[in-house]
Amino acid sequence: MTNIIEVKDLKKSYYDSEEPTHALSGVTFSVRKGEFVAIMGPSGSGKSTLLHLLGLLDIPTSGEYFFDGKNISNFSGDELALLRNKKLGFVFQSFNLLARTSVLDNVKLPLSYSDVPESEWEEKAKKAVIAVGLGERMHHEPSELSGGEKQRVAIARALVNDPDLIFADEPTGNLDSKSGKNVMSIIQRLNEEEGKTIILITHETSTAEHSERIIRIMDGVIESDTKVKNRLSIDSDYVK
């Protein structure tokens, strides 16, 4: 299977003070299409910086990043934005939903930045909402939803453009254990049943064990890169 991501000696430094801060100090790895990879590390380890680089939200100080075989250093800002919108989906810990806006309209939002005809927005958004088990909550606003339901809306929004790769940044961080298991079951189903490539950022081992592989980062370098021996199975009680 071919690689969707390949990074070589990726480095990122910040120069907000006299002494530079080296957030990443030479990271090299690849992710195959259809793989589910968890990136773990304590606060300050560099995992969030790596997410921003892989998600095309920031650019590296040095090193190479190939997405689907193409060196992203050759892309303009507009080309990167287009690639990010068409190929990538994002799920964040804080949900980032628009208040006083229905579930359906929240999910539609990425389509307004796409080349999808407006006449297709409603159907695509409804399909994504139903896929995460919220068909009956489609016209509710975020204030009327539980934390787990809000995160499922965020997943639907990440799915609406049918991305090749989904980034999940601490997706269970604000949820109780039951809601967290439900959300991880949905994400794992996207990987196992629909073939989506997933990159999960987490500090929780139990969450990371839904993946096939765990990359541990410490002080800006990869500490270990191992297969998950006893991958957790999809929760049979997850909401379809």
Image (cartoon, rainbow, N blue to C red):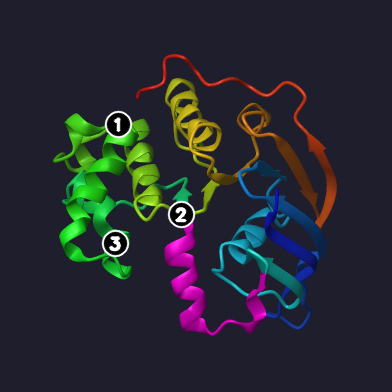
Give x and y (percent) for residue 131.
Answer: 33, 35
* Mark toward the viewer: 1 or 2: 2
Residue at the spot 45% in from the left edge and 20% down from the top edge: 178
Amino acid at the residue labelled 3 = Leu
**Residue at numbered disc 1:** 146
Total number of numbered discs in the rendering: 3
Determine which residue is flagged by label 2: 163
| Residue pictured at 81% horizontal, 37% vertical | 226
Residue 132 visible from this viewpoint: yes
* Crowding at mark 2 (Cα within 10 Å: few <14, some 14-19, many 20+): some
Is there CB contact under 8 Å for labels 1 and 2? no
Which of the pair 234/116 is nearer the observer? Answer: 116
Q: Give, as a three-letter code, the residue at label 1.
A: Ser
Residue ID for mark 3: 111
Few, some or many residues within 10 Å of mark 1 (<14, 14–19, 20+): few
Q: What is the distance, in whole Å, between disc 1 and disc 2 at their CAs? A: 26 Å
Question: Looking at the rendered structure, which numbered label has been put on residue 87?
Answer: none
Q: Which residues are magenta?
A: 70-88
